[in-house]
Amino acid sequence: MKIPLVDLQAQYAVIKEEIDAAVSLVLDSQSFIGGHFVKAFEEEFGQFTGAQYVIGVANGTDAITLALRSLELDIGVEVIVPANSFVATSEAVANAGLKPVFCDVDPKTYLLDLNHVEELITASTGAIIPVHLYGQMVDMKAVKTISDKYKISVIEDAAQAHGVCYHGITVGKLSDMACYSFYPGKNLGAYGDGGAVTTNDENLARKIRMMANHGRAAKYDHEFEGVNSRLDSLQAAILSVKLQHLKVWNRQRRLAAGIYHEQLADLDLPLPTSDEEDRHVYHLYVTRVDRRDEIVQAMKRVGIGVGVHYPIALPFLKAYHNRGFKPDDFPVAYEQMSELISLPIYPEITEEQIAHVVDTLRRNLI
């Protein structure tokens, strides 16, 4: 039984008629950049997230970069990011001319360890980027308390957390901005690259929209030098279709995670923890195992698409070698990076498929 890490073909089969119709409308309109389809999706995503302003951009990395640039921080200002995330989080900080400062992660949730954030704040700190990693939301009330105390900005990296909520707080409600990726494998994924910034600040929204469109509000009225980072109409139309299914898909992911919880209960593994159901949308189902690389290869040989997110914690990437980080600087992230394993999860995965994944994992753990 071959089981992929994520099955986009199974998803497409369910919504094929809707997707094909949406794509045909765009092709018939010959409106490929901006226009009705992008505006419609931005409005719909604003309603879904509760944000007043949504700016569609080319990808999730650009979303974070543009959000940071809109804060107009001085070159070299420090931005606190978690040690465990995709490189786009810290890469965007550098792309904005700022300095990423890494913080170790919580040993149970893998999220930014808020117990260590304050000790990293200096007079040079300008922002914090909490990452809702694997689909689980950081405690934004606690982040807000810290940011208010030190008067620093907060940008949420919600690339893996479309539709998540914690303590009644939705993404973006307690921050300056939230940034999304619509990479195909995300809970809400396009059929190519795409991203968005959401905010309730009209001034920030205006700046980001202009920056993403060559520094202009009107066609040839360029107020400053910007970049070309626009969500195209085809992707916007596809996302509008998928957005109508997202709540159901997230619920199906939670049900699949519940089955994993039950079937893995007899194994001595650290399973994903969440103190509220809505806090986790299970973009990934992540646990930790000994002999991780050996187990990954064994499961892939029999057609089970397990993954590793992420095999090298950010401070230990070659990109940051010149910073001279040591394992003791980030002990949790360093230890876990050789243990993390992602099991297949997607809305259409069946109980039979999950049972096969678990049985195969169990045999290889012995």
Image (cartoon, helix red, strand yellow):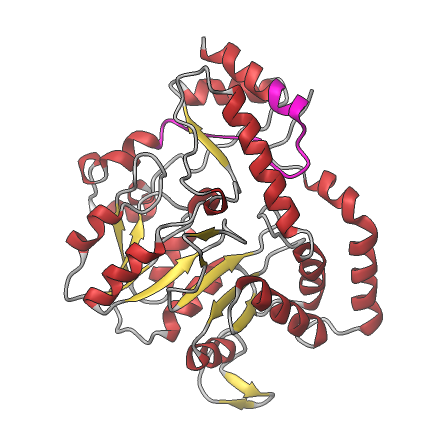
Q: Is residue 103 located in the magenta-colored stretch of the structure?
A: no
**Residue range highlighted in magenta:** 337-356
Which is nearer the eye, 57 or 95?
A: 57
How far from the left and from the top, in percent, is residue 329?
19, 40
* Image-based side of 139 in relation to 357, left or right: left
Q: Quadrant of the N terminus?
A: top right
How far from the left and from the top, in percent, is residue 284?
51, 38
Q: Quadrant of the C terminus?
A: top left
Which is nearer the eye, 244 or 112?
A: 244
How far from the left and from the top, in percent, is residue 303?
63, 22
User: Residue at position x 50%, y 80% from top?
Assistant: 210
- Can residue 189 be spotted in the picture? yes
User: Residue at position x 39%, y 51% from top?
Assistant: 131
* Image-based side of 152 in relation to 3, left or right: left
- Can residue 77 be spotted in the picture? no
How far from the left and from the top, in percent, is residue 347?
65, 39
Q: Quadrant of residue 100?
A: bottom left
User: Residue at position x 35%, y 44% from top?
Assistant: 111
Residue furthest to the top: 366
User: Residue at position x 29%, y 42% from top?
Assistant: 105
